[in-house]
Amino acid sequence: MTVIDKILYEWSFRCHDGIVDLNDPIKLSVLNEILKEYDLHLNEDNSIDYTKTLNPKEVAKFRKVGGYRGDKVVQFINDKKPFTLKNGNEVVLDFIDDENNYQDIFVNHRYNELKSNQNIFIDETGKEYKLEDIVKTSDFGGKVKGFSTKHETSALNEFNILIKNILEETNKESIDVKVGDTVYNNIIGAVNQPGVPKSDFNLVNSDNQPVVFISHKKEGGARSFARWGGFVFAFKERNEEVMQFVQNISEKITNNTFERNDSFAQRINSKELKDRIVFGKDFGKDFNKNNVQIVIQGKVTLTPENNIYVLSGENVWLNGQTPEGDFEPVLEAHYRGDFTSLKFKNAESFSRPIITIPTTTTKFNWE
């Protein structure tokens, strides 16, 4: 019997009806529990994203740790290390030897002389390649699929195991969960929220309908997570505070373009704007994926209380409970090459906890 056969057999044995089902959140948590015993992982997709490739702007990016990404290209060529191509193949490349002298361009960081979809490399058979043929693997700053949501996936898996254990211990098919002052009946598990809305995962009832929307933050206090969320929606609405932030930045930079060390932050006066950033842009409307009932940091817990289970965690903010202290959300914008945000070139913007704002950041409305 292979390892896969053993896992399938064990999974079937542990399911109450003997039927395995990847679409059933409770049964999926059982499978993840088994895989953990085998030191395997179902939901961590560490495969390469072949849709992300290099280009002239990518190789020109500079990082304090690692330097120019173009230097990594030179290193690959000198070490005869194979590049990964969009078709999944790996090939050792060299610079094309012609009047353009691409090797000299890369060695001396003259990336502005490069053009998109330009043949720069050649393999041992004489076939030529572009930067856009080369996949942006982790060596060149790429992220594997699922990287950014790894902690959310882990929290979701552990949460489903918790629910499963409660159901087994109480010999019930569902539980009632309390969020704030509201009780949600017939909860059977939690499922991932597709896309990139405010909700990360949701509690579903016996009709497989999402009824509790949860935003999850990595454990470890205010310094442990990078952002509360974006505020581009408020920029599009020409929110007064956001437009003032944009004006303040405009007065500090040239040609609406961020330079490498530019970073700006501004405190928010409006409670409504803070709440829309933290709980979702639909704050004030019915609960949905863009207006969550609760933000939970760290491990998600269910505490029994008169046959009802109270949803909680390391830190919790119920809808409308604006984070304060180190967690206070502030507007922030910083340099990020090849990005455009709030009308600024080479800029990225989002709201983050005030404690994470560097001392070197130019601050507005900070009294």
Image: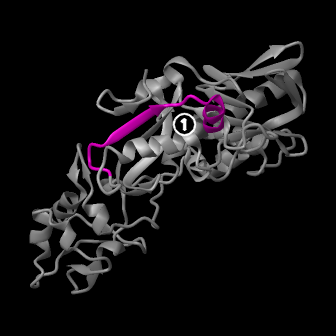
**Circle 1: element type:** helix
Please, which residue is most extreme toward the bottom here? 126
Q: Identify the residue under disc 1.
A: 151
Say if 320 sits above or below 203 in the image: above
Left or right of 166, for residue 108: left
- For image coordinates 72% across by 45% down, the residue present is 289
Find residue 116 and report its image quarter. Answer: bottom left
Measured as percent of width and height from the top left, residue 120 is found at 22, 78
Drawn side of residue 168 relative to residue 345, left or right: right
Write the residue at 30% across / 48% down. Answer: 253
In the figure, 124 relative to 214: above or below? below
Near-viewer residue (352 or 46): 352
Give the colouring mode of the picture: one colour
On screen, residue 150 versus residue 104, left or right, reads right
Q: Is residue 94 above or below residue 227?
A: below
Q: Is residue 221 visible?
A: no
Residue sitting nearer the eye, 129 or 329: 329
**As rendered, which of 31 and 200 lies closer to the eye?**
200
Residue at 33%, 33% (x, y): give it. Answer: 361
Looking at the image, residue 178 lies above or below residue 44: above
Q: Label 1 is placed on what type of residue?
A: His
Quarter where residue 257 is shown: bottom left
Q: Which residues are magenta?
A: 258-277
Viewer can see residue 125 = yes
In the image, is residue 257 part of the stretch drawn in magenta? no
Residue drawn at (78%, 20%), measured in percent from left and top? 310
CA neighbours of label 1 inside 10 A, class few (<14), some (14 to 19), many (20+): some
Percent position of residue 292, x then y: 72, 36
Residue 275 shown in magenta: yes
From the top left corner, tell me how far across and down residue 55 is, in percent.
32, 69
